[in-house]
Amino acid sequence: MSKILELDITLKDSKPKIWRRVLVPEDMNFHELHYVIQFAMGWTHSHLHQFIVGRYQERIGIPFEDDEEMEDSRNIKINTILNAPKAKIVYEYDFGDGWKHLVEVKKMHEPEAGKNYPVLIGGAMACPPEDCGGIWGYFDLVEKMKQKGTEEYEELVEWLGGEFDPAEFDMAEINKAHFKNFKKEMKDWDKLAGY
């Protein structure tokens, strides 16, 4: 039976650190890992993504029509790269906003009988809102959300559809919503994306 990887996913340049810890089977492919990251972080799969490998910047993702250099994430198992503690890869989501995540193997485990994988086991801080301008736009948004009663604050609340708490993180809700039936969730999201 395959090993279980304990992965830390950290949003680069985030302060305070926005991170998640997940347990995943080592034989899943990078397309599945994409969904693990989307679900764990709280992204909405609304933009393009890629994994970036090593200093030569090899790319893994869903190839665009004219992109012959991107390797197909559905055909590559994660244990070809994430195969030992401290092994790392970069995951980029939304090429406009440029959300880069460091994905690092912390430990390797034997699977526990009766336990479903993947599963979220830790983390902190809310996922930034989609389309807020990358990490620097997010920092600006957080500062403006502290200025209740201002015109900018009211505009942001309207744009966000309500209040935004940067410290909010509900691991139980994320597991229930996305990881309890991971394969079904993934298939539903794939259908919406036209994969």
Image (tube, helix red, strand yellow):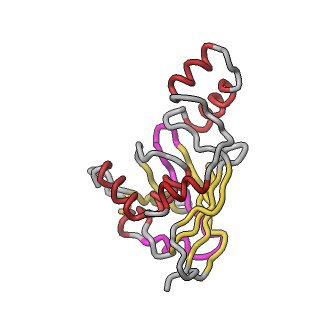
2 displayed left or right of 107: left
**Residue numbers of the magenta segment:** 77-98
Q: In which quarter of the image is residue 147?
A: top right
- Image vertical order of residue 153 relative to residue 179, above or below: above
In depth, the one of 120 and 176 nearer the eye is 176
165 displayed left or right of 3: right
Q: Where is residue 192 shown, x and y percent of the image? A: 31, 48
Q: Quadrant of residue 174?
A: bottom right
Q: Where is residue 87 shown, x and y percent of the image? A: 61, 69
- Give the residue at x 66% y 59%: 122
Task: Confirm whether the magenta stretch covers residue 146.
Answer: no
Please, which residue is most extreme toward the bottom here? 1
- Image vertical order of residue 7 relative to residue 173, above or below: below
165 displayed left or right of 81: right
Q: Quadrant of residue 62?
A: bottom left
In depth, the one of 132 and 73 nearer the eye is 132
- Give the residue at x 56% y 76%: 4
Q: How many marks?
A: 0
- Image vertical order of residue 194 relative to residue 160, above or below: below
